[in-house]
Amino acid sequence: MKDITEEKNLLRVKATEARRAAHARDVGGRAAAAVTTNFLSAVTLAPRAIIGGYWPIGTEIDVRPLLTALHERGHPCGLPVVHRGQPLTFHRWRPNDRLVRGVFGIDVPDPKAPEVVPDVFLAPLLAFDASGMRIGYGGGYYDRTIPALRARRPLLVVGVAYAAQEVERVPTDKFDQRLDWIVTESAARHFERRRFLWLRRFFAS
């Protein structure tokens, strides 16, 4: 029987290839445009809600058109900055802002950009399942960041992915954080986080 770490690592290998294939099929950035439409038509935001986004790397689905649309609708936006072993922080970003190279070679806002605390968190991922669980790269940054932000204020966590990244089951442990929404180029789906948390506690007891 595989342990949870082995299960996760095997899934990451398969999910990385699935995302790579989906990215290769995305001609002309149509998925990014569809994600923007699906998000804006399904996810209700409070006026001026602060958005924590990400700058896409590799084959991650591109959320820059969505961030630009949200900025134009009056939502302050921030991009994550990595601090090794710590939760992410977010710093203000506007379209056409200058970015600098950060940890792991990821582009981040200028260090002088003010820090913001998101109300809505757009999360990249390798795979997700029908219960709203996600798996990332294994560094734990998002699973540390989500509870840290929720300790400060209510937070809506929206996974963004290609539809082909859905799997039957994501192996999880007590540190993994559930999504509130998943938005793909095909649809936007909402997950009832409280109900799933109750079921998780019931079966763990």
Image (cartoon, rainbow, N blue to C red):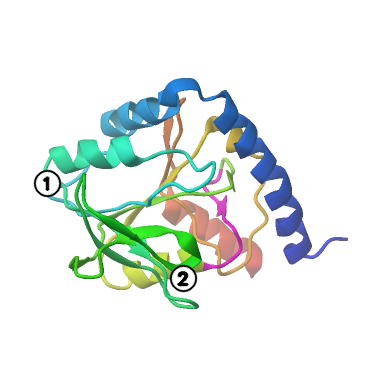
Image quadrant where residue 32 sits:
top left
Q: Main secondary structure of the magenta part?
A: loop
Which residue extends farthest right? Answer: 1
Query: Would residue 199 appear left or right of 194 to someone viewing this image?
Result: right
Image quadrant of residue 50? Answer: bottom left
26 left or right of 149 in image = right
Asked if the magenta segment contains residue 137, the reply would be yes
Q: Amino acid at mark 2?
A: Arg
Q: Amino acid at mark 1?
A: Pro
| Residue found at the very far bottom of the displayed protein | 85
The first of marks 2 and 1 along the sequence is 1
Q: How far from the left and from the top, in percent, is residue 23?
A: 55, 32
Per the image, the residue denoted by label 2 is: 144
Q: From which residue to which does the magenta span run?
A: 131-140
Count how many numbered circles sit on residues in the image: 2
| 141 relative position to 70: left or right | right
Q: Residues within 10 Å of mark 1 (few under 14, many from 20)?
A: few
Residue 150, compared with residue 73, is above or below; it is below
Element marked by disc 1: loop
Say which quadrant the N terminus sits in.
bottom right
| Residue 193, x across and y down, in percent | 44, 53
Q: Is 21 in front, or is 162? A: 21
Residue 113 in view, yes or no = yes
Q: Where is mark 1, residue-wise?
A: 47
Disc 2 element:
helix
Residue 166 visible within the image: no
Q: Are marks 2 and 1 in contact (CB under 8 Å)?
A: no
Report the front residue among 51 and 57.
Answer: 57
